[in-house]
Amino acid sequence: MIHARNMVSISDLTKEHWDSLYRCCCDIITHPGEYVDSCRGKILATMFYEPSTRTSFSFQSAAQRLGGDTFGFSDPLGTSASKGETLADTIRIVAAYADAIVIRTPQEGAATAAAMYSDIPIINAGDGGHFHPTQTLADLATIMQKRGSIENICIGICGDLKYGRTVHSLVEALPMFPGVSFKLISPPELRMPQYVLDLMQANGQEYEESEQFAQSIPELDILYMTRIQRERFHSSAEYRRLKGVFILTKELMATARPDMLVLHPLPRYGEIATEVDSDPRAAYFEQARYGMFIRMALLHDFLNLPRLAPPPVASSDTAPIKCRNPACVTQSETYLPQITPAGDPGRCGYCDKELVD
Ligand code: NCD
């Protein structure tokens, strides 16, 4: 079975690939000693144009636990990006020195663009408010470890569903598992974006949008909390108005099912009271640790892939695209050719937003 060689979005992941990653993750947890040399001599590059604690450190730790090495940056000011180098050129150079690249950027669609210029695997560690597929791998691994199955459950996703990239990828992954329904709990201003709702409809996923946090909790098998994404707001007044809108407390936990899991990609900023941490249903710190093990499984696979020239980028006489989404990578990387998602010419192939009203 040949699996994808990039993890840019969850659409790169088949159920078979997930099953094999999860099997490998479990084996790594039980027999870590058997993997200490599995990436010996291999190098992971970490390109973080945005702050990160868990994703960056868990990837570095994962590569090192497999016997591999890492280099990278957490502040683009120290790189040639600050001299105006294009993403395409930076990727070509980093790909010459490494065996896989993990990239986090504020530009939506940047990992898709990076994969077009790379002969080594590209892993999207978060592209603006768009996607964060390896957080989803961590989320799925945690649910499997704690519940043993991801079928026939009701998941409440709560908070900033507009800018929270982790939940866009999570929702995209769950059609792989039968019988999952959603309660999408947010203020109206932070609703799930239309392109994600369209995807849910196309996948026949059952969902209900609501602002009813306390009322929803007793019905949930999993409560996935998210942080209001301050850095993506255009107005700080709007952020101040919406922050603190939903707070999970001990009192609310008392109304939940005895086996309801609480997940959060972290960092939190007040949306889960610290008094909840000692509740055995609070799984967010374990989730961060499972994130490292599932990333080890991904790197065990990706760092050992042979180099493969990317498909040729559209020729220079193809007119570049400038999508109207101000956060789209095509705003700053002005040479990128137009690409459209399969079967949907009305959408930007980088950030997934509608190209016209
Ligand atoms: C998330 C992210 O960066 O999108 N954090 C993470 O990777 N674990 C969530 C967040 O920042 O709120």
Image (cartoon, rainbow, N blue to C red):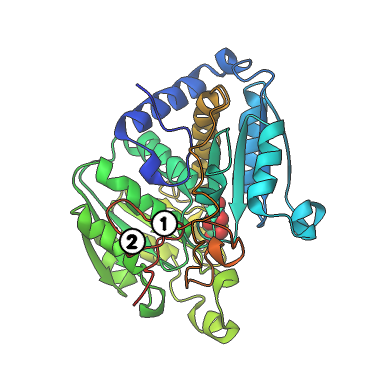
Mark 2 burial class by Cα count in 10 Å: few <14, some 14-19, many 20+: many
Which residue corresponds to the image point at 59% horizontal and 82% vertical from the top-left? 236
Coordinates of residue 107 in the picture (x, y in percent): 57, 61
Spatial CA distance of label 1 from label 2 is 14 Å
Q: Which badge, 1 or 2, comes first in the chain's sequence?
A: 2
Q: Amino acid at mark 1?
A: Gly
Q: Is residue 203 above or below residue 329?
A: above
Q: Amino acid at mark 2?
A: Val
Q: Is residue 217 above or below residue 307?
A: below
Label 2: which secondary element: helix
Of circles 1 and 2, the one toward us is 1
Q: Which residue is mark 2?
A: 196
Question: Which mark, residue 204?
Answer: none
Q: Which residue is mark 1?
A: 349
Label 1: which secondary element: loop
The residue most toward the top is 34
Which residue corresponds to the image point at 78% horizontal and 52% vertical from the top-left? 80
The residue most toward the front is 317
